[in-house]
């Protein structure tokens, strides 16, 4: 698409998600093509993708094998139900996913997005306790600044105030929150996991004492909080959460929508931290974002309690028309084959120190008050402009786009998550460009 075609495009009907619609439509940024590490903008410029789209195109864009799998599946069978019916790709994809999930989390329930995966995991947690005669466990504990998607369950356990505000009167009732783990004073500019902060996990004991363990179904956290601005768990923190959950019979849910599929150099963050949850959500990188897909991986204990613990008939009254959609699962099969064949998780692990050095080169740059990273996830926090929080982050993002690099602003925090096929020079270019942009933004 050229500039003229873009100018003729009617932008009014599409109510854009998580977008300042009026601001965007007055100066649109359109992407028309993608290949490998690059997008092409509507005006024909090459845009280096520093964010893997939205933390999702882990293997790089439009990989031939995934494109072919989608095309073939679309031509062979567009749709088949998975309610009391089935088709091979959904089973094949579940088996391939289960090869990589941690521990005995080998039972895969398909959804269409991370948000649906979260709501599904919360419902499975409730169904599990009920199947065991502990239906009184209905409370969820999550964490301030957590992001768990936008459905009612995920919004209720979400800890980002702006995402809750308009809906706060209608949230799922029994939810309480752990404190988030960011403390720039104690652990600013940490490389990798901060040494400070494991004690914050003990807050869970306080909430258990307050509510009584018998009311709590599950704790849900992102192993590394992404969308809120990259909060890396302190050393020992996740291990401690696991211990406390075990002590009180509470399920631990890892929301791995961002950390899943190699972001930390292992298939899932659970393997990186050596902490195995009871339920794990994924989406995004599961099929390299080639079609909408999410999933929940459940442990054998949970699966068997619900499936074997129910008299004959449907065991879990839950599912989506598109659970295990043929095209989405065909893309997942091709993606997982590609991850394995090109050893892309090992490549992600190898790039992590390069990425760490490059992102921390911005220490001392204008406006920068903190830098955080783990694996191929990074955040650069800027001091907010007086009276205009978020403006500096947004303007830096726009400058970077004009200079040919896609970064992601979350308020005044710039987030980075490049595809694993990035070359070292491309990683350097991302942060060189951000440095230039910061010099130009007030
Ligand atoms: N959970 C986490 C940790 C996420 O980062 C996201 C999206 O970024 C979601 C859930 C929601 O996923 P989706 O946007 O696919 O619904």
Image (tube, rainbow, N blue to C red):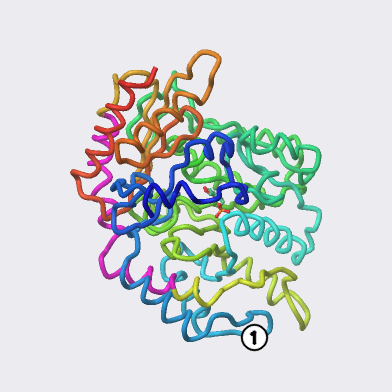
Query: How far across and how far down the image is residue 244, in percent?
Result: 59, 44
Identify the residue position indicated by label 1 in the image: 85
Position of 124 with respect to 113 (left or right) is right
**Quadrant in which the C terminus appears:** top left
Position of 359 with respect to 295 (left or right) is left
Position of 45 with respect to 121 (left or right) is left
Total of numbered circles in the picture? 1
Camera-side residue of 428 and 178: 428
Camera-side residue of 378 and 69: 69
Camera-side residue of 269 and 118: 118
Residue occupying the point 59% across, 69% down: 109
Camera-side residue of 368 and 435: 435
Q: Is mark 1 within 8 Å of ligand 1?
A: no
Query: How far across and how far down the image is residue 83, in percent?
Result: 68, 80
Label 1's element? loop
- Judged by its main secondary structure, the magenta piece is helix
**Quadrant in which the N terminus appears:** bottom left
Query: How far across and how far down the image is residue 193, in percent?
Result: 38, 36
Query: How far across and how far down the image is residue 74, in percent?
Result: 48, 79
Q: Does residue 201 show up magenta in the picture?
A: no
Q: Which residues are drawn in magenta?
A: 331-360
Residue occupying the point 61% across, 71% down: 323
Q: Is residue 392 above or below residue 271?
A: above
Q: Is residue 417 above or below residue 314?
A: above
């Amino acid at each position: 698409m050229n500039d003229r075609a873009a100018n003729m495009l009617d932008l009014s009907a599409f109510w854009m998600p998580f977008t300042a619609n009026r601001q965007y439509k007055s100066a649109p940024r359109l992407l028309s093509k993608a290949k490998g590490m690059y997008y092409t903008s509507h005006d024909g410029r090459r845009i280096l993708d520093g964010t893997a789209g939205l933390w999702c195109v882990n293997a790089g864009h439009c990989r031939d094998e995934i494109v072919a799998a989608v095309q073939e599946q679309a031509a062979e069978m567009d749709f088949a139900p998975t309610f009391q019916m089935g088709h091979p790709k959904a089973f094949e994809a579940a088996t391939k996913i289960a090869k990589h999930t941690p521990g005995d989390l080998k039972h895969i329930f398909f959804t269409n997005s991370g948000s649906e995966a979260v709501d599904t995991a919360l419902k499975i947690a409730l169904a599990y306790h009920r199947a065991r005669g502990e239906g009184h466990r209905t409370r969820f504990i999550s964490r301030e600044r957590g992001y768990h998607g936008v459905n009612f369950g995920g919004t209720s356990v979400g800890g980002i105030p702006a995402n809750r505000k308009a809906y706060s009167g209608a949230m799922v009732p029994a939810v309480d929150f752990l404190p988030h783990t960011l403390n720039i004073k104690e652990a600013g500019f940490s490389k990798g996991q901060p040494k400070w902060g494991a004690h914050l996990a003990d807050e869970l004991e306080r909430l258990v004492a307050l509510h009584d363990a018998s009311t709590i179904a599950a704790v849900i956290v992102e192993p590394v909080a992404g969308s809120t601005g990259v909060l890396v768990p302190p050393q020992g923190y996740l291990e401690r959460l696991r211990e406390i959950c075990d002590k009180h019979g509470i399920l631990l849910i890892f929301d791995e929508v961002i950390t899943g599929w190699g972001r930390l150099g292992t298939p899932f963050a659970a393997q990186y931290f050596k902490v195995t949850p009871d339920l794990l959500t994924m989406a995004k990188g599961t099929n390299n974002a080639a079609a909408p897909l999410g999933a929940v991986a459940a442990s054998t204990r949970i699966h068997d309690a619900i499936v074997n613990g129910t008299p004959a008939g449907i065991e879990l009254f839950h599912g989506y028309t598109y659970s295990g959609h043929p095209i989405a699962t065909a893309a997942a099969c091709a993606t997982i084959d590609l991850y394995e064949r090109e050893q892309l998780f090992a490549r992600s692990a190898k790039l992590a120190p390069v990425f760490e050095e490059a992102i921390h080169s911005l220490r001392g740059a204008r406006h920068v008050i903190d830098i955080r990273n783990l694996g191929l996830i990074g955040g650069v926090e800027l001091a907010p402009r007086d009276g205009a929080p978020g403006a500096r982050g947004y303007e830096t993002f726009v400058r970077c786009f004009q200079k040919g690099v896609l970064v992601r602003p979350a308020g005044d925090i710039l987030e980075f998550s490049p595809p694993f096929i990035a070359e070292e020079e491309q990683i350097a270019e991302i942060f060189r460009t951000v440095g230039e942009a910061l010099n130009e933004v007030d």
